Amino acid sequence: MTPYSRLFIGAAAALMVTSTATAQENELHIYNWSDYIAADTIEKFEAETGIDVTYDVYDSNEVLEAKLLAGNTGYDVVVPTSDFMYRQAQAGVYQKLDKSKLSNWKHLDKDILARLDASHDPGNEYAAPYMWGTTGIGYNIDMVKERMADAPVDSWDMMLDPEVVEKFADCGVTFLDAPSEVFPAALNYLGMDPNGHDPENLEKALEHLLKIRPHIKYFHSSQNI
């Protein structure tokens, strides 16, 4: 079994235009999450527009942020999670959107735009929402049933109850290699604010995660795909 968690709790992955891009008119440089577009998307886009695409992928917000804050990335478009997006925008790494050139802006979900406006992108100046999601756990049904017929597959107990996780250690339990993904889940599981930064609560979350750690096969943010 390989359960995994990707935390987009109340978070949007947003298309961002970087202010450090150096692409020519017929070139487009994109930096995106692993497995976020269809296999034929780039080919179709290039055929329709005549624009050459350079497409690179990453598997954590931390990797993206380190590259952005270093400057001169050469990317035209990147796709951060909304909570990371705000501080990156404040650091000046993004160019404001020219909505007069975005003819499909009117089709974006107004509720999602309002949420971004209120939380991470006032005035929707820097980002267009690409997707809005919730946390997920993936698992192999047959391998789970073999080890625990009444496994709590509809609960975070599958990932955060040490006694449950231990039962699946032999076939493999994995987490994303990103503290910003794992700690909110642990905080929420313990009845605390998943978006909180109280040192005492974070210490409690760490103590709980250490109880699970012996049963985790690996930490990786794209291998689960």
Image: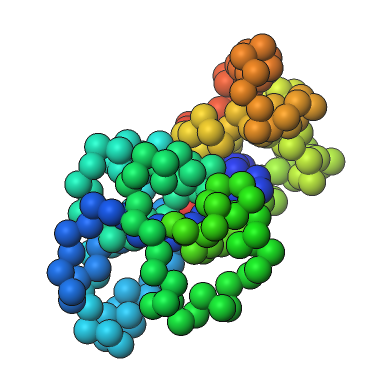
Position of residue 158 relative to residue 95, above or below, is above
The outermost residue toward the right is: 150
Q: Is residue 13 visible?
A: yes
Q: Is 83 left, or right, of 198 in this rendering? A: left
- Along the viewing direction, whichever of 32 and 102 lies nearer the viewer: 102
User: Residue 209 in the image: x percent, y percent?
Assistant: 63, 21
* Way the structure is coloured: rainbow
Residue for point 78% across, 41% down: 155
Q: Is residue 175 visible?
A: no
Apparent side of residue 148 relative to residue 129 in the rendered image (left or right): right
Q: Quarter of the image holding residue 170?
A: top right
Vertical comparison of 127 with 50: above or below: above
Q: Residue at x 65, y 18 (%)?
A: 198
Give the residue displayed 34% in from the left and 44% down from the top.
92
- Residue 165 placement, left or right of 174: right
Please identify the residue farthest to the bottom as the structure is shown: 48
Nearer to the camera, 46 or 72 = 72
Give the answer, above or below, for where 63 lies relative to 199.
below
Percent position of residue 212, x then y: 63, 22
Which of the 4 image quadrants contains residue 27?
Answer: bottom left
Between 75 and 189, the one nearer to me in the picture: 75
The residue drawn where x is 53% and y is 33% is 180
The spot of residue 153 in percent (x, y) is: 76, 45
Which image quarter is the N terminus in?
A: top right
Estimate the x, y position of residue 48 in percent, counting from the top left: 30, 87
Q: Is residue 30 above or below residue 2?
A: below
How many numbered discs, if any? 0
